[in-house]
Image (cartoon, coloured by chain):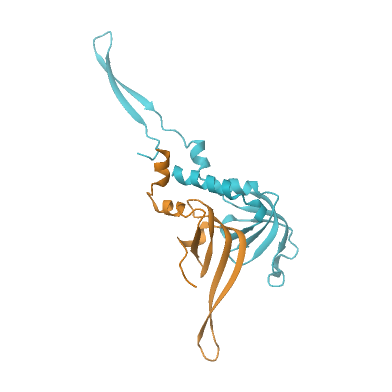
Amino acid sequence: MATEEEIAVKEPLDLIRLSLDERIYVKLRSDRELRGKLHAYDQHLNMILGDVEEVVTSVEIDDETYEEIVRTTRRTIPYLFVRGDGVILVSPPLRTV
Amino acid sequence: MGRSTNHTKLAIASFPTSTDESVLGVFFLSFSKPESTEQREKKMLFFSYFKELVGKEVTVELKNDLAIRGTLLSVDQYLNIKLENTRVVDQDKYPHMLSVRNCFIRGSVVRYVLLPPDAVDIDILHDATRREARGN
């Protein structure tokens, strides 16, 4: 009985439960993205991630040519607590690069 | 139904009295309970986790990009944070708090808390998360 309840996926938060201890992709506000291993989360989507890579995307406009330059800044953090109010979406990691 | 709710259950029973009148008795079988401690604890995973971290050195990154490194002094249910022995990470860029050594940070302005690797017990976190998730 207990194992059935554990596996049952009833609401969206249950989908995240399936990704515990797996690598996930998190899209945050302010054009930020995180990829890391999900260790803990709660109903607010506060999360603790391990081995995280943060990508910050910024667009600069050249003064002369007026072209848009898209820049990404990356950094890696061993363990990170993320506050849930900044989270937009959570997903298994996209297979890019 | 898997969800536990605080229903008040009613039962209606009738029984004869000495005056030969049947009296309808309404019995409460179970009362509406105030939120049990178990239910309250379910909402406090990260509060409990941060309480364990008190005394460790952390870096709090705020939503305005300011990063403050300091020793965790205390935390509350809203994840407001008190730090002591604080230093701003990029002091040249953010000279606002050069002389500040203790601060209180409202939980809602926190974007990240960078944790020391030795403060993370992965298995305990996984178990606590599964318990909290299953209860909902």
Judged from this view, the residue extending furthest toward the top is: B18
Picture quadrant of residue A6 = top left
Q: Position of residue A27 (x, y in %)?
A: 48, 65
Q: Nearer the viewer, residue A3 or B71?
A: A3
Please, is residue B108 above or below residue B39 in the view? Answer: below
Judged from this view, the residue extending furthest toward the bottom is: A64
Residue under the point 65% across and 51% down:
B119
Colour seen for chain A: orange
Please, is residue A39 above or below residue B35 in the view? Answer: below
Q: Is residue B132 at least partly visible in the picture? A: yes
Q: Position of residue B102 (x, y in %)?
A: 72, 56
Residue under the point 57% across and 47% down:
B123
Q: Is residue B110 at least partly visible in the picture? A: no
> Which chain is tinted cyan?
B
Q: Position of residue B79 (x, y in %)?
A: 59, 51
Residue under the point 49% across and 55% down:
A45
> Which quarter shows the N terminus of chain A?
top left
Q: Nearer the viewer, residue B91 or A19?
A: A19
Q: Nearer the viewer, residue A33 or A1?
A: A1
Q: Position of residue B58 (x, y in %)?
A: 67, 57
Q: Nearer the viewer, residue B20 or B41?
A: B41
From the viewer's perspective, is B29 left or right of B64?
left
Picture quadrant of residue B15 = top left
Picture quadrant of residue B96 = bottom right
Callout count? 0
